[in-house]
Image (cartoon, rainbow, N blue to C red):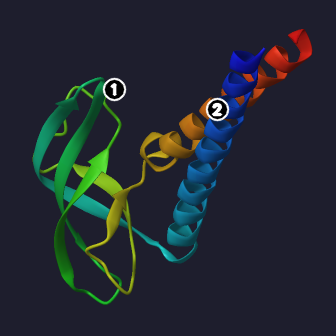
Amino acid sequence: MKQNDDSLKLLVIGGLLFLGFALWCSIDNYLFLKTAVSASGQIIDSEFVTFGRSQHWNLKVKFKTTSGDEITTTVKTADFFYKSHEQGSFVSVFYDPIHPMNARSNSFIYLWESSISLFILSASCFSIAFVMFKLK
């Protein structure tokens, strides 16, 4: 029984940690998107990156801000469904008007995958803990 109690505690603590990170990611995205401006960025270069099971594109893009400044920065996108991101093609980006180098790909997957994944992990921990508690 002691081992089950320890497992329950670890699952609840893990669920709370995942939930905290999920909320932090969600709030960060919300605050960014609340003030972000959309722009069309021209791809200058692209690189497909694989790190373990994680895959994404690093896109070097050039775009103009609403004030007319030309910005060149790198954004990540999880849109690995595309065959490639060719030089000269355009992608939609969001940028912070105060710090335009802080730009993000206008991609639902890239913007929200961390939050969604962490919420799912949190719910899984809580569900397993609940089942273990009921079977106790």
Number of numbered discs on residues: 2
**Residue at which label 2 appears:** 10
Image quarter hosting the C terminus: top right
Please state the horizontal and vertical placement of residue 17, each as a whole percent of the image: 60, 46
Residue type of the residue flagged with mark 1: Phe
Left of 110 or right of it: where is 9?
Answer: right
Please tell me how crowded label 1 is: few (under 14), some (14-19), or many (20+) other residues with Cα within 10 Å: few
Q: Nearer the viewer, mark 1 or mark 2?
A: 2
Q: Looking at the image, which is closer to me, 68 or 108?
A: 108
Please tell me how crowded label 2 is: few (under 14), some (14-19), or many (20+) other residues with Cα within 10 Å: some
Left of 128 or right of it: where is 94?
Answer: left
Q: Looking at the image, which is closer to me, 124 or 66?
A: 124
Q: Looking at the image, which is closer to me, 118 or 98?
A: 118
Numbered circle sitting on residue 52: none
- Circles 1, 2 touching at the beta carbon (< 8 Å): no
Residue at 18% x, 66% y is 73
In the structure shown, which secondary structural element does the residue marked by tag 2 occupy? helix
Residue type of the residue flagged with mark 2: Leu
Is 126 placed above or below 22 here?
above
Please state the horizontal and vertical placement of residue 56, each as a whole percent of the image: 27, 36
In the structure shown, which secondary structural element does the residue marked by tag 1 occupy? loop
Please state the horizontal and vertical placement of residue 13, each as a whole percent of the image: 66, 40
**Residue at which label 1 appears:** 81
Q: CA distance from mark 1 to mark 2?
A: 36 Å
